[in-house]
Image (cartoon, rainbow, N blue to C red):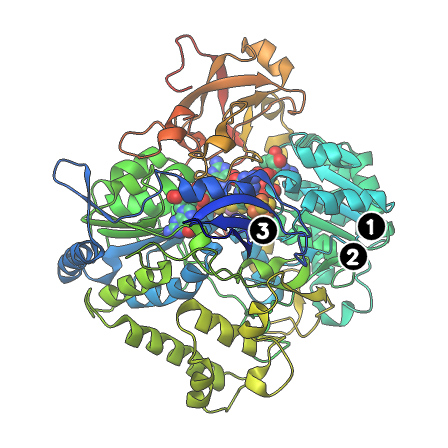
Amino acid sequence: MSTEPVTAIRTCPLCEATCGLEIEIQDGRVGKIRGDAQDVFSKGFICPKGTSLRELHHDPDRLRTPLIRNAAGGFDEATWDEAFAEIARRFSAIEAEHGRDAFATYLGNPAAHSLSAIVYGRPFLKALRSRNVFSTSTVDQFPKQLASGLMFGTATSVPVPDLDRTQYLLILGADPAVSNGSLMTAPDARGRLRAISERGGKVVVVDPRRSRTARDADEHVFIRPGSDPLLLLAIVQTLFADGLADPGEHVLPHLSGLDDVRELAAPYTPEAVAAATRIDAATIRRIAHELAGAGPAAVYGRIGTTTAEFGTLTSWLVDVVNVLIGSFDQPGGAMFNTPAGGSGNTSGEPGAGRGVITGRYASRVRGRPEVFGELPAACMAEEIETPGEGRIRGLFTIAGNPVLSTPNGDRLADALDTLDLMVSVDIYRNETTRHAHVILPAPSPLQRGHFDLALYSFAVRNIANYSPPALPLDDGMPDEWETLLRLTAIAAGLGPDADLQALDDYVIGEAVRAEVGRAGSPVRGRDADDLLGLLAVRRGPERILDLKLRTGPFGDAFGAREGLTLAQLESQPHGVDLGPLVPRLPEVLRTPTGKVELAPPAIVADLARLEPALERWGSDEDHDSLLLIGRRALRSNNSWMHNLPKLVSGPEGCTLLVNPDDAERLGVVDGEHAVLSSAAGEIRLTARHSDDMMPGVVSVPHGWGHDLPGAQLGVAAEHAGANVNLLGDAGLLEDLSGNAVLNGIPVSLAPAREPAAVS
Ligand SMILES: Nc1nc2c(c(=O)[nH]1)N[C@H]1C(S)=C(S)[C@@H](COP(=O)(O)OP(=O)(O)OC[C@H]3O[C@@H](n4cnc5c(=O)[nH]c(N)nc54)[C@H](O)[C@@H]3O)O[C@H]1N2
Ligand SMILES: Nc1nc2c(c(=O)[nH]1)N[C@H]1C(S)=C(S)[C@@H](COP(=O)(O)OP(=O)(O)OC[C@H]3O[C@@H](n4cnc5c(=O)[nH]c(N)nc54)[C@H](O)[C@@H]3O)O[C@H]1N2
Ligand code: SF4
Ligand SMILES: [Mo]
């Protein structure tokens, strides 16, 4: 007998926009998915990926049972007990012979959106006690977080443009009309950007490609890939030279290094950088004047600026300009969020702190410094391949697909096959997880509770929204946090049959005891057992979330004041709007000096590396070169939503975009296959002529190349595309953050003579 359809309200976990969804459910089947018009933040906005959660939930290729690799190289379905026993057996053997640094972890992008992974990833890493911690952060945003950390004191102190109140926005290397915003949580980013122009403001986009955001904007400026730091230096130089640099009364008392910045930028006049950036001096000067004179203004840089040769330098300069133009930390400028779930800049004593220290240890083979407790993802292959003490023998991947998402994925794939243990917690058997000894499936996103603990820290309003699971777990399927806790038990030496409830009680006990002991905590000095009693109705990530909310900046401090609790969020399924961003200087700072460090020595030293680049990029040879950049598409999500027919139907997703003049010169025909090669490798794919491309620049999206044997992705294999990261160079890391350089790679292009191997 059929049951009544119900409507579940929940936040979409797929990207940073945190849209509210309305999901029809009947008899355990997911029906229509619409935007939740009552969501306090997204107000009904939804994108094609959000609606495809239905297809994702019912995808027959999505894993429902653990898999264990067999002697023939295939996989056998296994029970959960068998899977954990196999992991424990291999784990003990490695530990006995090689010790702790023989283990490694790689956390992928969906882990940043998963309450389970955010909350239980940490105890797992702690129990593993290995230095080999890798994640997508080093193929993504570490440069921004490092620059923010050095300037403001913590990795999450990333200023976000106050989109809804700004009058002028300069965007570098981001396409929020497609990506829906990143380190700028803003559902319907496209609508919010258009609103700036509609209220008489201006949006300027700097990008080597006329992106969707650029087409919507008031002005688009082409730039030579990678040269953004020069443009920004010239803007800084102009602001000082023309008497426009004025941080304002609100910021000045908390500022250190203003004179240093003036001096450092002095040589970089607009004329000096014009040839290297390909932007004429008058345009640079005009943009500098507009930024200073347009009312509240902000600069925003993203993936095109962080996955670049000078990512940290560029990320720093973005906020130097933000400070100099006078609207920093003010409505309409670049501002700090106040996250309801708390972060490094809401806990502890306000106004000063330990700041950021990097390089406490280094990677074994290349000696790359640790940043925020992680080593560069692009070092993984060499750490597995190279013999000696500390060689990685056991790897855990959690929600990641590094074979497609990191440079030289082919080399990494070969290395993975030499491991003594590889465990993947994932929802698919894909290009990476096919190498695992054991794959542990995570439930569908609709079967889990959700609160975007990480991404709300970068939202353009202060928002709190919790969603309970829309559907129950399948019979016998543990929640992802239980799987992670089981792995924690194995890593802690408690074995695969440990009492998870006891371990979970230990985790929350530690968290509460730390909180009551923390200086500045609203529950400092309270009795830990009392608080644990108040939390006792919950378990798992929800219990930790309740603790974080209640001790966070809007929390009820366990009854000591009016404020948020998880119970309150549960009663408000469309979310709680905690208001627009508010000025937070100087309380937000956690630098040792208690100042905004406008000229952090580590970053300033990196300017020495930029000087030769200025000359190199201005040369005739550079003007004749061909450079590769990436892009994103609305119907794609990094490497992993290509198995959903609705998203991959229609025009081919993985194509090369080339300016028609370049194409003609190179004999590359529109719609035909071309060969794109770099020092690292070559790929074949369909070329598309496009006036949107700057001459001398080609664009290929990442996350494709689904033609590898052993994966179980029936639909994606029919739309395989080519893996652009075969052209990247794992040896090429940004100096300060260890982030891989994925944009601005020198390439050559030719027509393909034979039919393409991949289509
Ligand atoms: N050339 C180039 N390379 C890039 C980029 C680029 O711009 N250009 N961008 C980089 C960026 S920004 C990022 S974030 C990375 C992404 O890099 P990765 O995170 O390594 O790759 P994803 O494609 O996001 O893969 C996510 C994996 O998580 C699985 N998954 C999905 N949902 C869940 C879940 O709920 N639980 C679990 N356990 N698993 C789940 C998917 O099946 C998939 O295997 O790629 C980077 N690589
Ligand atoms: N639809 C969709 N949305 C996504 C994702 C997805 O895969 N698909 N991925 C999510 C993830 S993990 C992330 S990190 C975010 C990223 O969010 P965004 O940073 O907005 O990512 P992109 O859309 O790749 O935009 C990057 C832009 O930088 C430009 N660019 C490349 N090199 C340079 C350069 O040297 N200088 C300048 N000025 N511009 C350059 C590219 O042409 C491109 O337009 O998107 C998230 N949202
Ligand atoms: S924009 Fe992002 S959060 Fe919103 S529906 Fe699309 S994928 Fe989900
Ligand atoms: Mo990302």
What secondary structure is found at the residue carrying circle 1? loop
Vertical relation: 619 (above or below) 632: above
CB under 8 Å between callouts 1 and 2?
Answer: yes
Nearest the viewer among 372 and 464 is: 464
Horizontal and vertical percent position of residue 325: 79, 55
Front tag of 3 and 1: 3
**Mark 2: amino acid:** Gly
Q: Which residue is pictured at 46% across the width and 31% down the height? A: 645
Quick check: can you spot residue 687? yes
What residue would you read off at disc 2?
A: 332
Cα–Cα gap, marks 3 and 1: 30 Å
Horizontal and vertical percent position of residue 348: 56, 78
What residue would you read off at disc 1?
A: 167
What secondary structure is found at the residue carrying circle 2? loop
Ligand 3 neighbours mark 3 (CB distance < 8 Å): yes
Q: Earlier in the sequence, mark 2 or mark 3?
A: 3
**Quadrant holding the C terminus:** top left
